Amino acid sequence: MTLTATTLPVDDPAIAALRGVGAKVTSARVRVLQQLRAAPGPLTHRELLDAVQTPGGMPVDRVTVYRVLDWLVEQQLAQKAADQHGVFRFAAAQGAGTHDTHVHFRCATCGGVFCLKDAPPPRPRLPKGFRLTRMDVDIQGECARCARAH
Amino acid sequence: MTLTATTLPVDDPAIAALRGVGAKVTSARVRVLQQLRAAPGPLTHRELLDAVQTPGGMPVDRVTVYRVLDWLVEQQLAQKAADQHGVFRFAAAQGAGTHDTHVHFRCATCGGVFCLKDAPPPRPRLPKGFRLTRMDVDIQGECARCARAH
DNA sequence: AGGGCCAATGCAACAGGGTTGCATTGGCAA
DNA sequence: TTGCCAATGCAACCCTGTTGCATTGGCCCT
């Protein structure tokens, strides 16, 4: 029996999001994004790899999952942050298309990323002759849910 | 020539802190803690390993540095947290959790670190239930001397 | 001052997350 | 349908961090 394996539901919001950025809609991308959106919290690469392997379907290479994840972050469809063990966790991006004029709060426990309304700190005044190329602000702590769970 | 290599200044605050927890005062522990205390910000294992190797002195094994660091955290003399790249960074424990987040500038060319007295970063407003544990501002660029040298 | 116990060290090998190079496949547009 | 080029699979690699075990060296005790 040959089922038309490539036929995907066009109305799937994950697929719509992928088409929205004008990129190739591939099986790996769709499956990873679907899992991210269905998950209750940020997932590790390992968890996603397991989740994406369906018994009947084609297996997905772990490198592909890494690349899809980084690509989703690039496209602002996902967020990436290290958890307290130093392992990256990924989550579906919250507000679609919200731009980068804000800072992120990183929960050191679950690895979740939260957007803060505050504006990023102003560009500091540097001593004469100094040149600034990059500024990273790392705000970490514990989110409400993890704090409650103790 | 045999200089009394093990003679260490007893008045060194790092050594005093080590004696304070009633533990063996070893060369590796002293050197790591001194570096942690002298550093302008949290350091990675790699940075500490480099800092601890003095040209004339005995080399220190990387595993020892790992063990010393974990031991310092156990003794509450240091704090450990993963940075946004998933690498652990260590900082000397500060009395009573003072968040003295002063900004430092790192020259990408010569690796020098400069403390900026200018900008005390404003503490961001967090959603209800959120707890802030650390805030690091990492500014990269080129210092005046390297920019001039080209 | 010297001896001895046991923690701390050094070394080697391992483990796991993440990356890179390259040949092949498969989406999508012409 | 054809063809281009991005996306994939695969293998090998790098880096951070850990574990087992033999040896060394702090520190206490006499």
Image: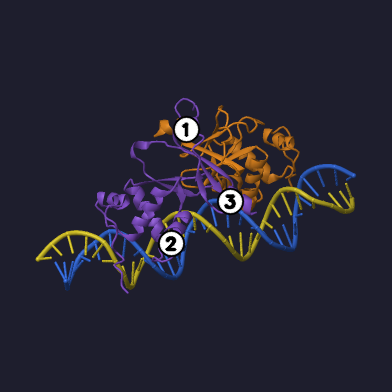
Chain colours: A orange, B purple, C blue, D yellow
Looking at the picture, how far across and down is residue B112, in whole percent?
A: 52, 51
Q: Secondary structure at mark 3?
A: helix
Are the residues under marks 3 and 1 on the same chain?
no
Q: Position of residue A67 (x, y in %)?
A: 65, 49
> Which residue is tagged 2?
B53
Q: Amino acid at mark 3?
A: Arg
The structure residue drawn at horizontal position 57% and vertical position 45%, both measured from the top left corner, is B140
- Residue A31 place in picture, x, y as percent: 65, 42
Q: Earlier in the sequence, mark 3 or mark 2?
A: 2
Task: List x then y, in percent, for residue B15.
Answer: 30, 53
Q: Which residue is mark 1?
A: A143
Label 2: chain? B
Q: Please tell me whether mark 2 or mark 1 is closer to you in this view.
A: 2
Q: CA distance from mark 2 to mark 1?
A: 39 Å
Identify the residue under disc 3: B145
Q: Nearer the viewer, residue B35 or A95?
A: B35
The crowding category of the residue bearing disc 3, from other C-alpha atoms within 10 Å (few below 14, some 14 to 19, many at least 20), is few
Q: How many badges with numbers are in the image?
A: 3
